[in-house]
Amino acid sequence: MQKVVTLSPSNDLQNNSASRCYVTETGYRDCQSALQGYAIEHRMLVLMANYAAPTRDFACAGGSAIWSASGEPLASAGKTGQAIVLATKRGLGWIGDLLSVN
C-alpha cells in the first residue's frame, strides 16, 4: 500500500507521535480508531508499532500502522509476520510504505 498525503504549510512537521503497543484482537479496532482520531485532532503523523506474535501472556493483533495528519492511513502491516511500516517526508507530503522482513 502506498499513498501520498500533502500537508498544508501551516502544519508543524515536528509534531509526530509513535507508540509501541500490546494490542490484542479485541482491542485493535478501538486503538486504531483512537490513534486515527489523535492524528486528526492534533494534526500530526501518528505511528503505532504493535507486536505481531504472542508476547508474554498476550496474543497480539499485529497491524502496525501510520496515519497522516488528516487521519488517512499511509501504511499498515498484516496481523502476523514481521514487517516495518514506513513514512517518508517528500516536500509537504508523506509517502507510506511497507517493508516485509523475512
Image (cartoon, rainbow, N blue to C red):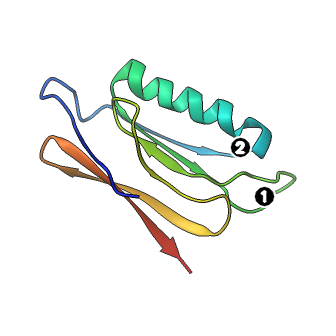
Which residue is at a point 71% across and 46% down the rendered structure image?
22
Which residue is at a point 12% across and 46% down the rendered structure image?
91
Q: Which amino acid does label 1 sit on?
A: Thr
> Disc 1 to disc 2, how far (Cα)?
10 Å
The answer to whether 15 is drawn above or below residue 92 in the figure is: above
Quadrant of the image for the C terminus?
bottom right
Q: Which of marks 1 and 2 is in front?
A: 2
* Residue at the top extreme of this rendering: 41
Instruction: Name the residue tied to disc 2.
Output: 23
The mark that comes first in sequence, 1 or 2, is 2
Which residue is at a point 69% across and 40% down the rendered structure image?
28
Q: What residue type is labelled 2?
A: Val
Image quadrant in which you'd find residue 27:
top right
In the image shown, does 52 or 16 lie closer to the viewer? Answer: 52
Image quadrant in which you'd find residue 23:
top right
Image quadrant in which you'd find residue 1:
bottom left
Which residue is at a point 83% across and 56% down the rendered structure image?
56
Can you tell which mark lies on residue 97? Answer: none
Can you tell which mark lies on residue 55? Answer: 1
The answer to whether 64 is drawn above or below residue 9 in the figure is: below
**Viewed as shown, does residue 31 lie left or right of 71?**
right
